[in-house]
Image: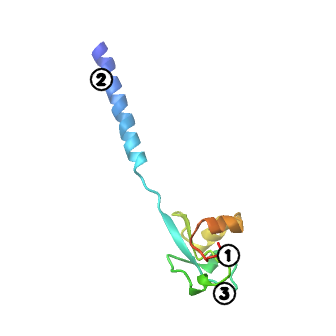
Amino acid sequence: MLKKINLGLVALVLGFGLIFTTSAFTSKTNHNWAFTPGGNDMYDGDAYVLNGTASGLCTTEEPYPCVISVPEDVTTNAELSTYLSGKTVPEIQAISTGRTPEQ
């Protein structure tokens, strides 16, 4: 009887260990979107290029986000517009990885 309980306990501990190791080491990646200044609204997903490079205008005095980092499931310009729609300018600047000096 005691052997069966010990064996069950060992199996339970191994099961939790397996769950922990598989969930603890999964990595979430982000997508980088480069903002293309020039009259574009920073809330407009069409103003960004997926995996693009920062515009040369990102060094000017305008508070452009330059390159923003968003969750990996945001893969289209429409999804990016939806993602940005509820954010404030400071929140967009906070997810910006390449920012102008004023930010």
Name the side, left or right, on which 8 lies relative to 64: left
Determine whether 29 is above or below 54 in the image.
Answer: above
Name the element at disc 2: helix
Name the element at disc 1: loop
The amino acid type of the residue labelled 2 equals Leu
Q: CA distance from mark 1 to mark 3?
A: 10 Å
Q: Residue at x 61, y 76 (%)?
A: 101
Q: Are marks 1 and 3 in contact (CB under 8 Å)?
A: no
Task: Give how far across and how far down residue 103 sits, in percent.
Answer: 64, 72
Q: CA distance from mark 3 to mark 2?
A: 67 Å
User: Which residue in the protein does label 2 denote?
Assistant: 7
Q: CA distance from mark 2 to mark 1?
A: 59 Å
Residue located farthest toward the front when viewing the structure as drawn: 101
Determine whether 55 is above or below 87 in the image.
Answer: below
Residue located farthest toward the top when viewing the structure as drawn: 1
Name the element at disc 3: loop
Dot 1 crowding, Cα within 10 Å, few <14, some 14–19, many 20+: many
The amino acid type of the residue labelled 3 equals Gly
Q: Earlier in the sequence, mark 3 or mark 2?
A: 2
Q: Residue at x 51, y 80 (%)?
A: 53
Dot 2 crowding, Cα within 10 Å, few <14, some 14–19, many 20+: few
The amino acid type of the residue labelled 1 equals Met
User: Which residue in the protein does label 3 denote?
Assistant: 38
Residue nearest the viewer, comparing 83 with 37 = 37
User: Which residue in the protein does label 1 denote?
Assistant: 42
Dot 3 crowding, Cα within 10 Å, few <14, some 14–19, many 20+: few
Residue 96 sits in which quadrant? Answer: bottom right
Residue nearest the viewer, comparing 66 with 30 = 66
Indicate the quadrant containing the N terminus: top left, top right, bottom left or bottom right: top left
Task: Give how far across and how far down residue 52 sits, in percent.
Answer: 51, 79
